[in-house]
Structures are given as C-alpha cells and as structure tokens.
Amino acid sequence: MTIPYEHHIFVCTNRRPDGHPRGSCAARGSEALRDALKGKVKEAGLSNVRVNASGCLDFCERGPVVCDYPANMWWSRVSLDDVQDLVAGPLSNAPGCEALRLTESELRRGKPV
Ligand code: FES
C-alpha cells in the first residue's frame, strides 16, 4: 500500500464556546498555527508533508494539539514560535521538539493531566 505523505499532519482547529471547561485549540490560536505550519512546509519544499485541519483530538486541555501520521507523534501546547522547529526537526526527519511531545503513557491514558 502506498502512503501518499510521509508526514500527514493534523492540527486541531476545533472551537468551543468561550468559557467551556475544556477550552479548545482554536481558542488558543490553532487556526493561525495551522496556516503558519502550512506556509512554512511549503516554503521548505517538503512535498512529503501535508498539513490539514482536524476536529477535536481529545487532548483539549493541552491545546493546540498537532499529530503526525503514520509516525504517531503528538505535540501539545504548540505555538507559532514552535513552527520553525517542527519543520526543521521532526517534519524533516530530524530530532527536535521533544518538550512538546505527548508521552506514550499520556497517549495510552487518552486524557492528559
Ligand atoms: S479542542 Fe483540540 S484537542 Fe480538543
């Protein structure tokens, strides 16, 4: 089976009403994050990377949340300041952004603390 993208990136852009107890990634700036990530990927010429918006990824309290398939890497509390490091690091198959990664146990538990 052919995998069309080496890194298929999903940026949660779910938005909840102001005051919702879980908050939402869009309320924390994920729409601008998605746009910046798309722009930087294009600028870097990474044709093996596709950036898409997604609905809620269920780590709302840690938003904005970004995940990478099929690598199954997840980053939380991603900001515009992290875009360059994501593109030059993991999305270019280089190390980086470890401090943003959700751990295996956090992913297994399904709910962040
Ligand atoms: S609102 Fe983004 S993970 Fe739920």
Image (cartoon, helix red, strand yellow):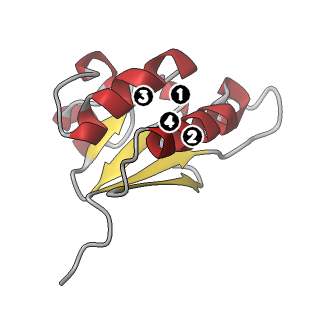
The residue to which callout 2 is attached is: 39
Instruction: Provide the secondary structure element on which disc 2 rests.
Output: helix
Q: Is mark 1 within 8 Å of ligand 1?
A: no
Q: Are marks 3 and 2 in contact (CB under 8 Å)?
A: no
Q: CA distance from mark 1 to mark 4?
A: 26 Å
Residue sitting at 25 percent across and 39 percent down? 92
Of residue 51 and residue 106, the one placed in the foreground of this image is 51
The residue to which callout 4 is attached is: 40
Q: Earlier in the sequence, mark 3 or mark 2?
A: 2
The residue to which callout 1 is attached is: 61
Q: Which amino acid does the dot numbered 2 rest on? A: Gly
Label 1: how many Cα within 10 Å (few below 14, some 14–19, many 20+) = some
- 20 vs 97, left or right, is right
Q: Is mark 3 within 8 Å of ligand 1?
A: no
Q: Earlier in the sequence, mark 3 or mark 1?
A: 1
Q: Is residue 81 above or below residue 52?
A: above
Q: Is residue 69 above or below residue 45?
A: below
Quadrant assignment for the N terminus: bottom left
- 95 vs 88, left or right, is left
Instruction: Provide the secondary structure element on which disc 1 rests.
Output: helix
Q: Are marks 2 and 4 in contact (CB under 8 Å)?
A: yes
Q: Which amino acid does the dot numbered 4 rest on? A: Lys
Instruction: Provide the secondary structure element on which disc 4 rests.
Output: helix
Quadrant assignment for the C terminus: top left
* Eye-nearest disc, 3 or 1: 3
Q: Earlier in the sequence, mark 1 or mark 4?
A: 4
